Image (cartoon, helix red, strand yellow):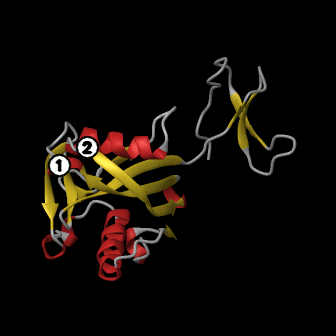
Amino acid sequence: MKLMSFCNACGHQTQEQIPLGDHQVRQVCMQCGNIHYINPKVICGALAIWQDKVLLCRRAIEPRYGLWTLPAGYMELFETMEQGSARETREEAEAEVEIEHLYCMYNIPRIGQIYVLFKANIIEGQFGAGEETIESRLFAEHEIPWEQLAFPSVERTLRHYFADRVQNQFPLHLETLGSRLDHTG
């Protein structure tokens, strides 16, 4: 599958090759020799909590417009995962959070993504709706709109949280998610 035709360094045409010492087909520039690596994207976010309720945002953007999600988005260059999680929470839910610890990590190889979610506390209980959010709300477990969740990672994280809360222990959960059709993610 050719993902790019031209070199992003010099603009000349690329060709599929297995570079010396590599084991995968890559796009290689025939002019300057630049090897183009396409790697997974990192999505970072927060399971933001206030008084035993979780903060969910209703998406104002595609994909999954109108469905509920945890505040999360693509990690930016020059920021840590924790900084990215706090930034995304600020941007999407207008909430400042205190990051506790890494809580859930999901490999999603079929779409080339890694989801990293931190358990966090909302500072002073303040939140709102950013530009990418229709509304945000705090939900108790029995209020979660399970059938209106945007992504499998959101459902898995919430289910982990409510199960872990019973024991008052919140270990790291690492999983690989599949497609919605096979019920693994």
For the residue marked with disc 1, what is the amino acid?
Answer: Glu
**Residue 42 pos. (x, y %):** 49, 47
**Residue 106 pos. (x, y %):** 48, 62
Q: Does residue 88 sit above or below 140 in this rendering?
A: above
Viewer-closest of 9 and 145: 145
Q: Please name the residue that numbered disc 1 is placed on.
A: 124
Residue drawn at point x = 46 percent, y = 71 percent: 171
Q: Residues within 10 Å of mark 2 (few under 14, many from 20)?
A: many
Corner quadrant of residue 37: top right
Residue 12 falls left or right of residue 97: right
**Residue 5 pos. (x, y %):** 62, 31
Q: Secondary structure at mark 1?
A: helix
For the residue marked with disc 2, what is the amino acid?
Answer: Glu
Is residue 125 something that shows in the picture?
yes
Identity of the residue furthest to the right in this view? 20
Labelled disc at residue 86: none
Residue drawn at point x = 86 percent, y = 45 percent: 21
Viewer-closest of 24 and 48: 48
Q: Quadrant of the C terminus?
A: bottom left
Residue drawn at point x = 19 percent, y = 44 percent: 133
Corner quadrant of residue 167: bottom left
**Residue 89 pos. (x, y %):** 29, 45
Residue drawn at point x = 77 percent, y = 20 percent: 32
Residue 129 falls left or right of residue 29: left
Q: Does residue 7 sit above or below 96 in this rendering?
A: above
Q: Are marks 1 and 2 in contact (CB under 8 Å)?
A: yes
Discs 1/2, front: 1
Q: Please name the residue that numbered disc 2 is placed on.
A: 96
Mark 2 or mark 1, which is nearer the start of the sequence? 2
Q: Secondary structure at mark 2?
A: loop
Tell me how far mark 1 sits from mark 2, CA to CA.
8 Å
